[in-house]
Image (cartoon, grey):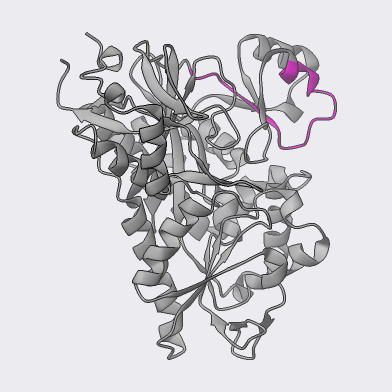
């Protein structure tokens, strides 16, 4: 029996919907609904079952991607040269490229902190494929950990470890302490930059509580509030109340509307010249662009010098080639070529983040006129479909449905891409959007089995 079709002992019915909702509330596994307060997150009560080999390969893929992207971030000249296609783009990565290109390298003082989430899908041949990487606002790992803990208390299983809260908390706290120590401060300060109407505060609070437990003071601010800070003669960022900032952790700043006007973009650029840790800095955020993914996917197959330049051994190169999918820049395609690829089920992807930024079929075809310079078409992932019934709690109701696709996001931390937990999302097979709070997906968990049952 294929392991994805094996559901094991389904104990989802052990609790009623009301009892599950109470468990979620007590665990703060939820979102902030404007005007209504806490709203439980949609969750799966049927873990995704992987073999140990599948799980280990996913970990290896995320570690490889995390380490490779950090090498690219540290090689600023290579990064800017290879992403020069973004120069004419109206997207956020295009804006970042132009800002970064305008800052002399010898003026960059910020300390980059790498917290990336590499989203992977398992195809029907049992191979992991790279969906995208998120180096900014790479969240939901802490909330997924809390859901695992909540579910495991009722349904004990051999769950894959998800230490997102502790691992990510230590990464951020260590970075804040490092900058504070440079200035002789024993009171490190982290600023979490959030939106005015943030609804994901429970996930964020799990992380900030851990950072605070480790001795770092945490404040939440919008980008405009943070922009009131000044830079001192020692290049340190100082808030209006006189406190110096050691770490900026971005949970917003990936869409154009997050900035509003040019002054906030200029502030973001000026931060590169301050001695502050940033998660992420501009170069790190640029490394998560779908354009760089497009470049890597092309070079890993066609450039004989790519592996040598980044010191990839034979097995790493083979794994990277497996992870990467063919893609094409829309700007390089004739209308006829564009139509042919869309009819071959290629996905249209813009450089924007969040829901609504991928399209296929007729919607993709309509995007050709007026396309951005950095839009790409990426080959479809023929993802494995979980045919077993999946029990889930959505909008307060217990449901049992078949035909789902799961997406695994693995967090990598720092230059060595250490494991930082995971986010597993499961959606109906034909659902286009895979987000938990703005899409059609539910939080899920991973059970690792040593062999097929």
Q: What secondary structure is the magenta-colored segment mainly?
A: loop
Compared to residue 87, the image places residue 445 above or below, namely above
Task: Please provide percent x and percent y for residue 335.
Answer: 79, 16
Relative height, residue 187 to residue 380 (above, below): below
Q: Is residue 319 magenta?
A: no
Tell me if 253 is positioned left or right of 78 in this view. right
Q: Can you say whether 345 is above or below 217 in the image?
A: above
Pinpoint residue 217: horizontal percent, then vertical percent: 46, 76
Q: Residue at x 80, y 57 (%)?
A: 260
Q: How many marks?
A: 0
The front one of 416 and 190 is 190
Quadrant position of the N terminus in the picture: top left
Q: Is residue 364 magenta?
A: yes
Please name whichever residue, 232 or 321, is drawn nearer the observer in this view of the structure: 232
Per the rendered image, the range of residues in magenta is 363-381
What residue appears at the point 41 percent right and 24 percent down from the top-left corner? 392
Quarter of the rendering containing residue 410: top left
Question: Looking at the image, which residue sits at the far right?
Answer: 370
Q: Residue at x 80, y 19 (%)?
A: 366
Which quarter shows the C terminus? top left
Question: 242 or 346: nearer the eye?
Answer: 242
Report whether residue 310 is seen: no
Can residue 262 be seen here? The reply is yes
Give the percent coordinates (x, y) of residue 177. 40, 77
Residue at 59% across, 22% down: 432
The quadrant holding residue 61 is: top left
The part of the image, by quadrant, that contains residue 355 is: top right
Across and down, in percent, residue 93 comes to: 68, 48
């Amino acid at each position: 029996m294929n392991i994805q079709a094996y559901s094991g002992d389904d104990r989802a019915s052990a609790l009623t919907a009301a009892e599950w909702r109470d468990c979620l509330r007590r665990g703060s596994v939820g979102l902030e609904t404007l005007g209504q307060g806490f709203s439980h997150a949609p969750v799966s009560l049927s873990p995704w079952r992987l073999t140990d080999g599948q799980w280990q390969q996913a970990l290896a893929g995320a570690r490889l991607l995390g380490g490779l992207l950090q090498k690219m971030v540290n090689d600023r000249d290579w990064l800017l040269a290879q992403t020069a296609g973004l120069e004419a783009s109206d997207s956020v990565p295009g804006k970042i490229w132009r800002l970064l290109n305008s800052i002399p390298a010898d003026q960059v003082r910020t300390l980059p902190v790498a917290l990336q989430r590499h989203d992977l899908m398992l195809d029907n041949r049992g191979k992991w494929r790279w969906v995208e990487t998120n180096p900014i606002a790479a969240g939901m790992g802490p909330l997924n950990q809390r859901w695992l803990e909540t579910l495991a208390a009722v349904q004990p299983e051999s769950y894959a470890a998800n230490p997102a809260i502790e691992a990510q908390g230590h990464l951020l706290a260590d970075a804040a302490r490092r900058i504070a120590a440079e200035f002789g401060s024993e009171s490190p300060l982290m600023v979490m930059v959030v939106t005015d109407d943030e609804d994901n505060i429970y996930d964020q609070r799990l992380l900030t509580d851990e950072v605070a437990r480790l001795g770092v003071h945490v404040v939440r601010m919008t980008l405009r509030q943070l922009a009131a800070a000044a830079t001192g003669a020692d290049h340190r960022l100082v808030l209006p109340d006189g406190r110096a900032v050691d770490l900026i952790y971005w949970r917003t700043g990936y869409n154009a509307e997050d900035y509003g006007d040019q002054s906030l973009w200029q502030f973001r650029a000026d931060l590169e010249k301050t001695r502050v840790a940033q998660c992420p800095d501009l170069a790190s955020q640029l490394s998560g662009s779908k354009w760089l993914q497009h470049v890597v996917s092309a070079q890993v197959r066609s450039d004989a010098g790519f592996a040598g330049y980044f010191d990839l051994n034979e097995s790493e190169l083979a794994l990277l080639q497996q992870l990467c999918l063919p893609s094409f820049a829309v700007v390089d395609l004739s209308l006829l070529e564009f139509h042919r690829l869309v009819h071959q089920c290629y996905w249209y992807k813009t450089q924007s983040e969040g829901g609504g930024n991928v399209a296929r079929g007729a919607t993709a075809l309509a995007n050709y006129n007026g396309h951005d310079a950095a839009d790409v078409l990426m080959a479809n992932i023929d993802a494995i479909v979980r045919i077993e019934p999946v029990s889930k709690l959505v909008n307060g109701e217990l449901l049992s449905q078949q035909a789902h696709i799961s997406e695994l996001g693995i967090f990598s931390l720092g230059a060595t891409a250490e494991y930082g937990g995971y986010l597993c999302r499961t959606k109906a097979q034909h659902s286009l959007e895979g987000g938990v709070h703005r899409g059609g997906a539910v939080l899920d968990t991973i059970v690792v089995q040593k062999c097929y049952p």
